[in-house]
Amino acid sequence: MNYKNQIQDYIALEMETLKKLDVDSIDLAMNLLMKAYENKKKIYIFGNGGSSATASHFQNDFNKGISEYVDTKFNFTCLNDNVATLMAIANDIGFEEVFRFQLKNKLEEGDLVIAISGSGNSKNVILAVEYAKSLGNQVIGLTGYDGGKLKELSDVSLHADVMSMQVTEDIHMIFDHLIMSIFYKTLCDKEHLKR
């Protein structure tokens, strides 16, 4: 079977979505990240499913990738990385609490929250974001589709305007690598690193 037409359609949708990205929002998100970094604040990041993998990737790229080359380190905490904690909260309290519970009595003034939800409506993500907002913390939300409730709640919305979960998740990884690449230049005085 020849899949070339479907391949080209997917690539075309990806390119169309990239062209619609809000550069001003990306710039605002980068400034919030830099503010947290310069003030030595924690950055909490989380998501479900593919978004949880993206959250883990963000943490890796900042806590190791960039932090390897700077004296002051980024302080990312990925709330979906500890399986034992997630399962205990989900089993004993409820899956909708797996992120909010971890933020309670830990989130401090100036800490930044990055919430990832393709639909923008994942209940556990929304509850954690609402908790963070109730304390006055700022939120960067990564969404797709119409953005859902997360887009409305976010101080800065990094939105993939597309009705495809796969392309949404691709774009979310591009946000990570785009920001990381620019910080390599501005913070580490390096071009793209090779391993």
Image (cartoon, helix red, strand yellow):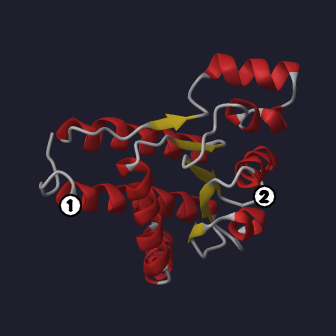
Q: Secondary structure at mark 2?
A: loop
Badge 2 amino acid = Asn
Q: Is residue 71 left or right of residue 52?
A: left
As drawn, 79 above or below 132: above
Are the residues at dot 2 and dot 1 in contact (C-beta closer than 8 Å)? Answer: no
Quarter location, residue 184: bottom left
Residue labelled with disc 1: 186
Q: Residue at x 44, y 51 (%)?
A: 36
Report crowding for label 1: few under 14, some 14 to 19, many 20 or more residues within 10 A (C-alpha).
few
Does 174 sit left or right of 189 as displayed? right
Check the image and report above or below for 16 versus 178.
below
Between marks 2 and 1, how big is the CA–CA gap?
34 Å
Q: Nearer the viewer, residue 72 or 180?
A: 72
Q: 146 and 85: which one is in front? A: 85
Above/below status of 112 relative to 79: below
Residue 68 lies left or right of residue 103; in this view the side is: left
Q: Position of residue 168 (x, y in %)?
A: 57, 63
Image point (80%, 47%), residue name:
127
Q: Quadrant of the C terminus?
A: top left
Where residue 43 appears, x then y in whole percent?
50, 44
Corner quadrant of residue 191: bottom left
Can residue 1 be seen in this snapshot?
no
- The circle drawn on residue 121 is 2
Residue 107 lies in what quarter of the image?
top right
The amino acid type, in three-letter code, at marker 1 is Thr
